[in-house]
Amino acid sequence: MFISNRKSLLLVSVCCLLFLNACSFSNSSESSSDSSGSISDSSSSVSSSGGSAKYESDVEDYTYAYIKSTSGDTDYSGFKKGLSEIAEKRGISDWESDAHTYKAMGKALKKAHIEGVGYETFQKNFADADPKKMKQIQQGYDSRD
């Protein structure tokens, strides 16, 4: 059963990465003279011109797929590696300190209808028990309808 879950997680991860690559190809067809998608300053790792929304959406989709593919067997190191790859593709230099990362995780938890002890467990593990990150996850959770 463990091998099957790992294969499922791997399949979901590959699908997410293929989706992200398709998005990257689509974005590359936009005008090269448009520099609004660049990193804006050191206070935010994503520009305010929509880059954060795309990043949050990618993280939410990836987290949702991860949540749905786990059945008690959680591989947080593999999950974090996937987040790192998403961040790299979106030009995020420090995803572990980016509030958009944790808000997107919260949105994914709400989308997956995770509540109670399950929510608290994912929240704590995703945030590495950091109260600030846990609060950001809660903000994302509360913001999703």
Image (cartoon, rainbow, N blue to C red):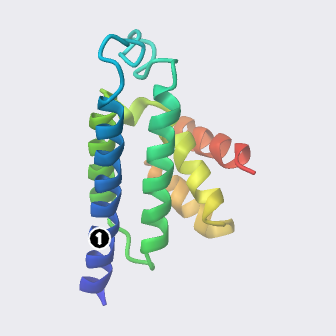
Answer yes or no: is residue 125 visible.
no
Q: For this view, does 71 lie left or right of residue 85?
A: right
Residue 87 locus on image (x, y percent): 33, 37
Answer yes or no: is residue 110 visible.
yes
Residue pushed farthest right? 145
In which quadrant of the rendered image does the N terminus lie? bottom left
Residue 142 locus on image (x, y percent): 72, 46
Q: For this view, does 68 lie left or right of residue 21?
A: right
* Residue drawn 36% across the image and 25% down it: 30
Q: Which residue type does callout 1 highlight?
A: Leu
What is the quadrant of residue 98 in the picture? top left
The image shows residue 55, relative to residue 21, as above or below, that is above
Q: Which residue is mark 1?
A: 11
Report crowding for label 1: few under 14, some 14 to 19, many 20 or more residues within 10 A (C-alpha). few
Asked whether 139 or 129 is in front, the reply is 139
* Residue drawn 45% across the image and 46% down it: 59
The image shows residue 138, relative to residue 15, as above or below, that is above
Residue 66 locus on image (x, y percent): 42, 64
What is the quadrant of residue 74 in the picture? bottom left
* Residue drawn 32% across the image and 76% down it: 8
Q: Secondary structure at mark 1?
A: helix
Residue 77 locus on image (x, y percent): 28, 57
Residue pushed farthest bottom? 1
Q: For this view, does 87 lie left or right of residue 107?
A: left
